Amino acid sequence: MDARTLLYRCRSADEEDLPRKKIALRTAHAIAQAIDPSITASAFMDRAANVVKRVYGGSAQDSYITTTMSLVSNFSENIDVYLAAVINALVVQLNFQTRIFLDGNQFALFDGQDEYFALAMLHGNVTMGIHLTPEARQVTLPRWANISPALEINADRMHHLPPDLVPIYQKANGCRSVGTVLVVNPSVDSGEFSLAERYSFLQGSVTQDTTFCVAGPAEMVFHAAADLQRMHPQAQLNLKAYRALFGRAEEYRAIMLFSGLDAVPEIVVRPGLSRPCEFDLKLVDLDENLTSVSYGNDTIAGRRNSEADGPARGVWEKAAVKAPFHLSSSAPLPAEARERISSEFEIFHSSLAIRDGILIPSQDAHHCTFLYATGEGRVLNDYGSDPSVTPIYTEGWLDEQGVRHGILHGRTLKRVRGPAMPLMFTPLLHKWHSHFMIQCLPRIRIVRDLGLDMTILLPDDMRKKQLEMLERLGFGPSKIVMMAPDELVQADMLYYPWPWRLGFTTYTSKVYDEIAAGIETSHIISPKRILISRESRKSWRNLINYDSVRHMLVEDFGFEVISPEKLSLSEEIAAYANAEVVVGAEGAGLYGAVFSGPKTKYITVCDEDYVMPILGSLAAIRGFDIGYVFGESFRSDRDVERRLPFGHADFIIDVDRLSQAVRHAISP
C-alpha cells in the first residue's frame, strides 16, 4: 500500500475486524514469548491495547501492522503505531523501487527519535538507511529484531552517520538519489532549524520523486506545512492530524508528506511544542481550580491541619526512631547527628489538586524538579516546588506590571483524561533506589485513600524491579503513563502530593507488607548473616576499605555477601526476612529491611557526616534492633556545605570497632 494512501486509511476497529486482529495477535504473542517467556497473555494484551483499537489501511496491511506493532509495544514503550506504520510504508515501497532501478539505488535518510529508525527499516532489506547522528556509531538492533520472518531487519544496510559521511556512503553504495527524508520527532535540544541548511549535503540528490516526511506534535508539523505552502506552493502536500494513544494518555500529532521538489526546501522546523506561562511566586491561593486534598484520614493517628492553620489541609504523622543497641564512632559526631539517631520526625500528608494541571520536568546541572501549572499556564509556587531556581524562570522576562513570563518547551504534551499523579516528586528521584522505596512507591497509598481511578505518571527509564513492585500492588501497564524527560503532561485533574522527608512511617511502610504477602518465599534458602555488597558503588559514599571489612566479616563470623540489585524480588524478600544479622552501609541495600521482622539485627556503617534516621525509623516499625558504627569521611574540614544532611563523602571504617558491634549483635 502506498504510504499516502495509508496516511488517510486509518479508522476505529469494529467487531468485523476482531477475527483478523485475533489471528495477528496470537502470532505476535507467540513470538513475544519466544523472546521473553515471562510475558503472559494478559500483560501482552495490556501493552497491545492501543494497536487493537484501530485498523491501519487494508485488511492485509492491518494484519501486518497488528502483528509487528503489538509485538514491538511489548518491548518499547510509547510507540506511536500510526507513525511507525507510515514511515515503514515509505521505506518498504522504496525497497521495491530500489530493486528495479537500473541507474542506481535510492536511500532513506532518517533524522530524529532513535527508536523509530529500526521501525522505519523493518523489511527494508535492500534499501540503505542512514540515521543522522553527531558521530558514526555501530548499529545495535532492538531485542525484538530478526526473531522471526515477521520482524526482519538487515543491519548491514543500516548506518548511523554524521552529515559529512553521508555523501561518501551514498557514493560507495551506488545510491543515485535520496528516496525519502524522514524527520521524526526531532530533539527539542537542537532548537529550530531550516531543512535546507540541515540537509545541505543532500543538494544534488533530491529529485521530484523524493518524499519528505515531517512528523511529530501537531503544532510543529502545522508550522512546517504553512511554511511549505507559502514558499513552495508547487509541492505535492499530504497532511494528516490525528490523536495518538499511549495507554491512558493521548497526544495531538500530525504527519505531512510532500514531494515534487528538486531541492531541499527552505522551510523551518520548530521541534516539539511550546506554551506561554507566567510565574506566580506567592503561596498557593485556593480557588475552584486549586484544591488542597487531605488523605490518610482513616489510617493515620495524626494531627490534622485545618484551613484556619493555612491553605494546605492534611494530616501530620509522627514517626519514631528506635534507639540503637550499639553506637560507636571513630570521629566526633556533630550534635545534629546525635539528634537524628533518636529524634522523632513528622510527615505531612496533603496533596494539591489542579484542574487541567500541567506537570513540567525541569533540570539542569544544579537541580532537578517538577513544576506544576494551571491549564492557562500559571506556574505555582508551594508544595515543595520553587520555580524561581529553574532555567524556565531565569530565561523569562518581566512585563510592565512586573509579572515574569516564560515559555514551556516539550518534545510532546501528553494529555491524560481523568485524575493523574506523579509517583516521583522530582524527575530523577527513582534513579536512587533508596529514594524510590522511601518517597515514591508508598505514594500508591495516596491513590487508594483518595478512592480515584488514578493514572500514575512514571519516568520512562524505571528499573524492572521497580515496575514489578508496582504491578504487584495492582498498578500494571494499563494504569500508568510513562514520561520522557522532555515531555509535558496535562491531566483533567493533576494531584501533586507534598514531598515526604527521608524516613519510613507506619503509613509508608504498609505497601511492603502487601508486596511480601503476595510472594511465596518458603522454598528459597538464604544466608543468616549478610553483608550488603559495596562493590558496585562507584559514585559517592564509597567504603574505601570495603575489602578489609568483607574479609573480617566472612572469615571471622561466617557472613555471606549479597548484592540486592542482582536478586529477584522474591529472593530479595527472602534474604531480608530470614536474616539474623545484616551489615551494610547506609543506603538502598539496607532498606530491604522493610521485609525484616523483630528477629533480625542490623548494623549500619557510614561516616560521621552521613547520619540518617531512615533505618532507625524502620526499626521502630518492624521491631528489629539497630546498631551504628561510624567511620571517618574524606571531606575537607572547610567543606561545611557538605555536612549534614548532605554529606556523601567516601569514608573508612575501623574494622575492630565493627567487629565489636557484630559480637554484641550475636551475643546471647
Image: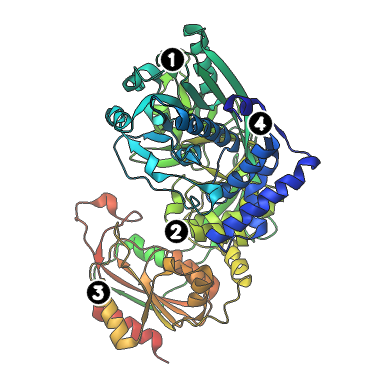
SS under mark 4: loop
- Residue found 53% across the figure and 51% down from its top: 75
Q: Nearer the viewer, mark 1 or mark 4?
A: 1
> What residue did someone put label 2 on?
433
Q: Identify the element where label 2 is drawn.
A: helix
Mark 3: few, some, or many residues within 10 Å (few <14, many ≥20)?
A: few
Please provide percent x and percent y for residue 204: 34, 17
Work out which residue is located at the far front of the displayed protein and give it: 102
Q: Which residue is mark 1?
A: 267
Residue depth check, mark 3 versus mark 4: number of the one nearer the observer:
3
Pointer 3 with pointer 2, Cβ within 8 A: no
Quarter containing the C terminus: bottom left
Q: Amino acid at mark 3?
A: Asp
Kindly identify which residue carries mark 4. 287
Compare marks 3 and 2 and give the one earlier in the sequence.
2
Amino acid type, label 2:
His
Q: Earlier in the sequence, mark 1 or mark 4?
A: 1
Q: Callout 2 environment at 10 Å: few (<14), some (14 to 19), or many (20+)?
A: some
Q: Position of residue 148 (x, y in %)?
A: 53, 53
Tell me whether circle 3 and circle 4 mark residues in contact (CB < 8 Å). Answer: no
Task: Give me the C-alpha separation between circle 3 and circle 4.
Answer: 59 Å
- The disc label shown at residue 547, or none: 3
- The residue drawn where x is 52% and y is 38% is 382
Report the label total: 4
Secondary structure found at label 1: loop
Q: Residue at x 44, y 47 (%)?
A: 428
Q: Badge 4: how crowded within 10 Å, few (<14), some, or many (20+)?
A: few
